[in-house]
Structures are given as C-alpha cells and as structure tokens.
Image (cartoon, rainbow, N blue to C red):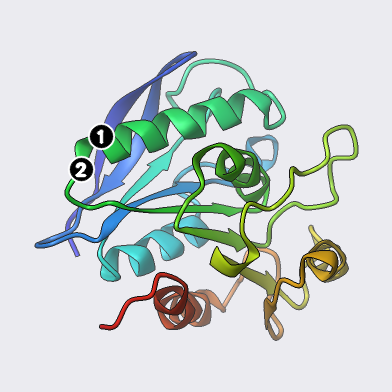
Amino acid sequence: MQTPDTIQIPGLCGPLETIYLPVRGNAKGVAVINHPNPLQGGTNTNKVIQTAAKALNILGFHCYLPNLRGVGNSPGVHDYGRGETDDCTAVIDYACAQHPEAPKLVLAGFSFGGYVSLFAAAQRKPDMLLLIGPAVKMYTERAEPPLPDAASTLLIHGADDEVVPLKNALEWAAPLDLPTIVLPAASHFFHGKLIPLRDTVLRYAPLILDDDD
C-alpha cells in the first residue's frame, strides 16, 4: 500500500482538502469515502473510513477521502447533506477523470457520510455502494433517496451501535430486501472491531464487484 497524500480537489465552495491513497501497479477503479458528521468531530482522518480505504486500496482502488465543506481546510459551512452531496460528486468526477484506465467506481460512507453517499449514488450509480453504520432514518426533514441498486450495495452495521441504532438499518433495508452484515459487539465507531470491519470489506466487496482474484 502506498503512502497517502493530501491534495486539493475543486468544489463548488472551493478546494476540497482530500486524502488520496494511490494504488501500486494496475488499478481496478476509484473509491470515494465520506466521513461522519463534522458537528460531532467527523473528518477524513476518522479511523472507520481510514480502515475502509485501506481495505479498498488492497482490492485495487485509488482512494479519495475528502473533507467535505466546512471541515478541516475545506471552505464553506456544513449543509446537512445537501451541499456535501455536491462536494462528493465533484470528487467522484475528479477521481474518475484522473484514472480513465481504472473504470470501476466504489462510493462509500460512514454514518453521516453514508447518508451523503446515498444521495451521490443516486446521481453517479457506483459499481458498489459501501455503507458503514449509515445515518438512515435519522434526518426526518430530508429522507434518503431510493437505493439505486440493492445488489451492488454492501451494508455493514454494529450490533451495539449507540448513535445510529441497528433497528434503523434493518427497518430501512427490509423493504429493499437488502442483506445487512451485523458485526457482533461492535459500537458505532467500531472500537476494538476495526480489523473485523476491514476483513468484512475484504471478504464481501469482491463478490459485489465480480472480482475473480
């Protein structure tokens, strides 16, 4: 795995501070991974999205972890998922343009980042949508959009999530017939469970992406 760099990606509010983790050798695609709620301290250095990025990098994806508007050195103000969706799609478009030889797109997000990723997925249709403890059924003023494709979605949730209750994920997934992977004894931030989280992504993501290796 390569050493990550910090780059600036053009966004509607200005340059988005983004961690970029390149692939050594042939890449399969790009992955954009969104951080949890910045009002609760979420940034692109969060351990959960860092864990997801390392797993996706091992699987052959150039990983981009933006600080969405108002976070870190990214300008703008928190917009409760609306403007952040524009930020996410800007990073997706930039990443895809940088790596035309690596056509697959993974869109991922943890907690609030999962909520943002749902809106971005409705616009950009990723080959895989990875949702980790997504903040579904939490924002009543703006409900989540329809899921583009349940078959290309990997949903992972902690059994003991104290921020986004597991029942939220199950109730949201039920009408979609979307299987949910539940990590036993895992809290919202997967304290002590980051290795099982990584291994879960490494185990199941290739099945969705139709990888043979």
Taking 113 as reference, is 1 left or right?
Answer: left
The location of residue 157, given as percent across then percent down, is 68, 71
Say the numbered circle drawn on residue 106.
Answer: none
**Most extreme residue toward the left, as rendered?**
25
- Decide: marks 2, 1 in contact (CB < 8 A)? yes
The location of residue 18, given as percent across then percent down, is 36, 36
Q: In the rendered view of the protein, which quadrant contains the N terminus?
A: bottom left
Helix, strand or loop at label 1? It is helix
Residue labelled with disc 2:
100
Residue labelled with disc 1:
97
C-alpha distance separating marks 2 and 1: 6 Å
The location of residue 2, given as percent across then percent down, is 17, 58
Quarter of image, res 54: bottom left
The location of residue 164, given as percent across then percent down, is 79, 59
Q: In the rendered view of the protein, which quadrant contains the C terminus?
A: bottom left
Query: Residue at 61% of width from left, 23% of height from top?
Result: 83
Q: Is residue 62 above or below residue 170?
A: above
Amino acid type of the residue tagged 1 in the rendering: Ala
